[in-house]
């Protein structure tokens, strides 16, 4: 859902809420990639998912660093949060995740990255703060790179992306 900013005073509150959400989204993605590797066999895809997990952590930290609210624990504490506490992980049945094959894990990752990139691009358009815009734009570009990397793995393993 795109941010609709009604006034300059709303911008800060709306942007901060979006940044807080993006911190959680990035941490959730990190947890997904870490869990998905447990059920994959292709070493290339596993390596890429491990790389993506690390980059998602870096994205979350970059959002954390520009978040000005005082309602979040330290980033270290947030990293210690068990994946089971994550809203995304809670929404995915653990048994279902264990039954995902590599194709399904890659398809889910493609959808995840597409959604995150869309959220980030909308956030870039909705902020006038140059520092926030720079961080979000950098993360959106990196997310697009994630998407392309996952799509390459999918095509290498399964051919056409439509399947």
Image (spheres, rainbow, N blue to C red):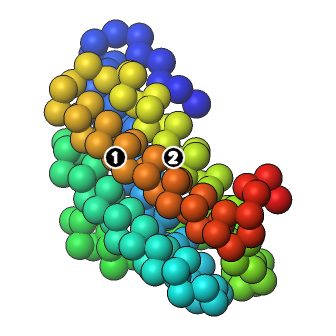
In which quadrant of the rendered image does the C terminus lie? bottom right
Which residue carries the number 1 mark?
Answer: 139
Q: Is residue 82 above or below residue 18?
A: below
**Residue 35, located in which quarter of the rendered image?**
bottom right
Q: Is residue 41 above or below residue 31?
A: below
The residue shown at (39%, 42%) is: 140
Viewer-proximal residue, 10 or 56?
56
Residue 12 in picture, x, y percent from top left: 27, 26
Total number of numbered labels?
2
Viewer-proximal residue, 2 or 49?
49
Disc 1 and disc 2 in contact, CB within 8 angstroms: no
Q: Which mark is residue 116?
A: 2
Instruction: Give the CA separation, mark 1 to mark 2.
Output: 10 Å
Viewer-proximal residue, 142 or 112?
142
Residue 134 in picture, x, y percent from top left: 23, 35
The residue shown at (65%, 52%) is: 111
Q: Residue furthest right?
A: 163
Viewer-proximal residue, 95 or 41?
41
Q: Residue furthest top?
A: 7
């Amino acid at each position: 859902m795109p941010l609709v900013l009604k006034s300059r005073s709303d911008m800060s509150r709306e942007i901060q809420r979006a940044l807080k959400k993006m911190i959680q989204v990035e941490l959730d993605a990190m947890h997904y990639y870490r869990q998905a590797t447990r059920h994959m066999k292709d070493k290339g895809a596993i390596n890429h998912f491990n790389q993506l997990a690390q980059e998602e952590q870096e994205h979350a930290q970059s959002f954390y660093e520009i978040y000005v609210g005082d309602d979040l624990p330290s980033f270290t504490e947030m990293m210690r949060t068990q994946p089971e506490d994550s809203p995304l992980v809670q929404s995915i049945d653990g048994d279902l995740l264990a039954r995902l094959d590599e194709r399904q894990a890659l398809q889910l990752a493609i959808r995840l990255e597409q959604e995150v990139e869309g959220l980030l691009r909308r956030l870039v358009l909705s902020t006038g703060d140059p520092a926030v815009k720079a961080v979000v734009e950098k993360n959106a570009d990196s997310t697009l790179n994630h998407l392309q990397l996952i799509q390459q793995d999918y095509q290498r393993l399964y051919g056409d992306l439509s399947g």
